[in-house]
């Protein structure tokens, strides 16, 4: 994240009633609509992690016994399914093999088989780096089950992957402050369509939660957007100042340049992976995320061998987290200002990975870092 975002996060303690904060919070709510491509949906900006967005969505939109179809491409798809079950949903998990996503024909068949209250999609499952076809799934839902809500887990995708909330027919985007939104962790962001809010109002049973109830938070969001203070629970003031700064730095020219920069940077990272003689976990180019890349390791190297060598070179990478495969791959992030600014972060990362693979004894057909695209 940028130095100005860090500075915004380290401002002196400020009351949530301070006019400076009220203005900053209202601006955040407005700018988040631009990020996801909506004019009418309602952002909820609440202290918590991205995972809290799962609870927000399940608690407010699902009633016990209702069917939810979860398109699971990895660890986080499974977690979202678990969360839905915790709130009483009858969950069908449509799983894809590691590195793959569901064929649209499979999704269509599932939609024809049952009527679902919600279909969930992890736009990028952080465990695999696989990019889901949100637009294609949303079109199928409109065709086969137009009353079904389309819920997108965008924690590892929002502001890095193209998403056009209104034109694609998305109903909920779940995300968080710490990835491509470019600010410190601590804010759960959920954007809900007016259709989703109508489902909330039509519930036959009370929302089975207190802190994440949108009926409690909606007046707060509306009030701050109108630049007036209203209280339910204390907002995360410094984190919201930081997110405000990051969004202002991101949005002067709109989202299209941001998406294009992530696409260029991701292509460069994938070119480096090919030069190392390795393969991405995402099995096909169209499945590769523009926010992060998961890379299969050679048979003679495990993640535990490589990661300390990267850390010694100043790079914090992640190992795998897929059950049964965790030791076989590693993950590199290239989102936010790492992708959109010419700051050398990606150069440093790729150089360190090349050297660490060498130190692990991996020989590859090409050793040089690919030139900038």
Image (cartoon, grey):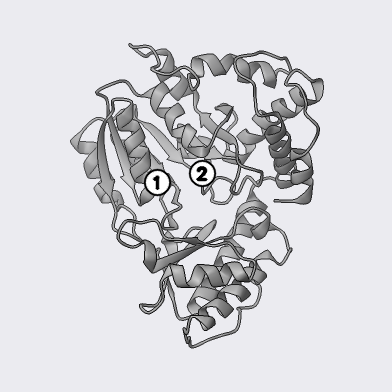
What residue lies at 28% left-to-right and 25% top-to-bottom? 88
Q: Position of residue 241 (x, y in %)?
A: 73, 34
- Badge 1 marks a residue whose secondary structure is helix
Location of residue 68 by image quarter: top left
Q: Is residue 128 left or right of residue 337?
A: left
The residue nearer to you, when weighing 371 against 55, is 55
What numbered label is drawn on residue 155?
2
Of marks 2 and 1, which one's residue comes earlier in the chain?
A: 1
What residue lies at 26% left-to-right and 42% top-to-bottom? 93
Q: Would residue 30 be seen by someone viewing this image from the given angle?
A: yes
Residue on which disc 1 sits: 76
Q: How many marks?
A: 2
Q: Residues within 10 Å of mark 2 (few under 14, many from 20)?
A: many
Q: Would residue 252 be seen by someone viewing this image from the given angle?
A: no
Q: Position of residue 62 (x, y in %)?
A: 35, 24
Give above or below for 301 relative to 74: below
Q: Residues within 10 Å of mark 1 (few under 14, many from 20)?
A: many
Decide: marks 2, 1 in contact (CB < 8 A)?
A: yes
Location of residue 111 by image quarter: top left
Q: Is residue 321 left or right of residue 228?
A: left
Q: State the CA–CA distance, disc 2 to disc 1.
A: 10 Å
Give above or below for 245 relative to 125: above
What residue lies at 75% left-to-right and 45% top-to-bottom? 6
What residue lies at 65% left-to-right and 25% top-to-bottom? 235
Give above or below for 205 relative to 191: above
């Amino acid at each position: 994240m940028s130095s100005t975002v860090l500075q915004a996060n380290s401002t002196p303690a400020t009351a949530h009633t301070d006019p400076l904060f009220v203005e900053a919070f209202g601006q955040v709510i407005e700018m988040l609509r631009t990020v996801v491509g909506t004019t009418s949906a309602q952002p909820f900006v609440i202290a918590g992690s991205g995972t809290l967005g799962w609870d927000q969505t399940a608690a407010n939109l699902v009633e016990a016994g209702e069917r939810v179809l979860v398109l699971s491409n990895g660890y986080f798809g499974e977690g979202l399914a678990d969360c839905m079950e915790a709130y009483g949903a009858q969950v069908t998990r449509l799983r894809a093999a590691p590195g793959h996503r569901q064929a649209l024909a499979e999704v269509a068949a599932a939609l024809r088989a049952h009527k679902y209250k919600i279909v969930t999609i992890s736009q990028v499952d952080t465990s695999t780096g696989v990019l889901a076809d949100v637009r294609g799934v949303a079109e199928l839902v409109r065709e086969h089950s137009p009353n079904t809500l389309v819920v997108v887990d965008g924690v590892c995708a929002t502001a890095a992957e193209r998403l056009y909330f209104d034109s694609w027919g998305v109903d909920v985007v779940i995300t968080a402050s710490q990835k491509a939104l470019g600010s410190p962790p601590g804010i759960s962001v959920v954007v809900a369509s007016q259709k989703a809010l109508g489902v909330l109002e039509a519930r036959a049973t009370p929302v089975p939660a207190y802190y994440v109830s949108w009926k409690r938070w909606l007046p707060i969001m509306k009030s701050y957007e109108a630049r007036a203070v209203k209280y339910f629970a204390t907002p995360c003031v410094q984190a919201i100042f930081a997110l405000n700064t990051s969004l202002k730095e991101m949005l002067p020219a709109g989202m299209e340049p941001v998406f294009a920069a992530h696409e260029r940077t991701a292509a460069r990272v994938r070119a480096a992976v090919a030069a190392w003689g390795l393969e991405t976990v995402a099995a096909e180019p169209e499945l590769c995320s523009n926010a992060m890349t998961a890379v299969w390791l050679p048979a003679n190297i495990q993640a535990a061998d490589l990661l300390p060598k990267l850390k010694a070179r100043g790079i914090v990478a992640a190992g795998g987290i897929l059950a049964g495969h965790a030791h076989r791959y590693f993950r590199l992030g290239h989102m936010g200002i790492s992708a959109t600014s010419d700051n050398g972060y990606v150069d440093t990362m790729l150089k360190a990975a090349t050297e660490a693979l060498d130190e692990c004894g991996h020989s590859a057909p090409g050793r040089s870092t690919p030139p900038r695209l």
